[in-house]
Image (cartoon, grey):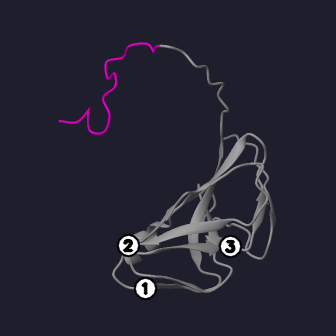
Amino acid sequence: MTIPKQVVCEVKGEYAPKSAQEGDAGSDLRASEEITIPSKGRCLVPTGISMAIPIGYVGLIWPRSGLAVKHGIDSGAGVIDSGYRGEIRVLLFNHSDVDFKVVKGDRVAQILIQKVETPQFIQVETLDETERGAGGFGSTGK
């Protein structure tokens, strides 16, 4: 088996992302301070880290499944571009009926580093016809 070349991301800060198991797609992001997410509310949780993601890659922020199932905590707005060098903060939503306390060092989300293509967009007057056409949400279901 050939091991693929690893992508290197430089990380500045106390809690560098870390995978729980070898081969995991995501690496855990940790909170750098204590914060409370109100019931049915949202909050930006600081991680205290910044990263240098290589050009041609993106960091995608995803929820931790355990937090989602056990506490109703979800994440959103998670695209970290390769040119961004500021602190990574995680937008967390609390869908539960009780406030959720995040303690410094808690794993709050995960980041996936993925290769991306940068398309060239060409403006045209018409598009080719397809079977689906302009059918939107739910149009392919029964």
| Position in image of residue 65 (x %, y %) | 45, 66
Residue 125 placed where, x, y %? 50, 14
Q: In the structure shown, which secondary structural element does the residue marked by tag 2 occupy?
A: loop
Question: Of the residues tagged 3 and 1, which is closer to the observer?
Answer: 1
Q: Considering the numbered disc 1 on the image, is that residue within a helix, a strand or a loop? A: loop
- With respect to residue 118, does 17 lie above or below? below
The amino acid beneath tag 3 is Thr
Q: Residue at x 68, y 80 (%)?
A: 32
SS class, disc 3: loop
- Looking at marks 3 and 2 on the same chain, the residue that comes earlier in the sequence is marked by 3
In the picture, the disc for residue 99 is 1
Whole-angstrom CA distance, mark 3 to mark 2, is: 21 Å
In the picture provided, is 94 more to the left or to the right than 103? left
Query: Which quadrant of the structure image shows residue 16?
Result: bottom right
Q: Quadrant of the N terminus?
A: top right
Magenta region includes residue 132: yes
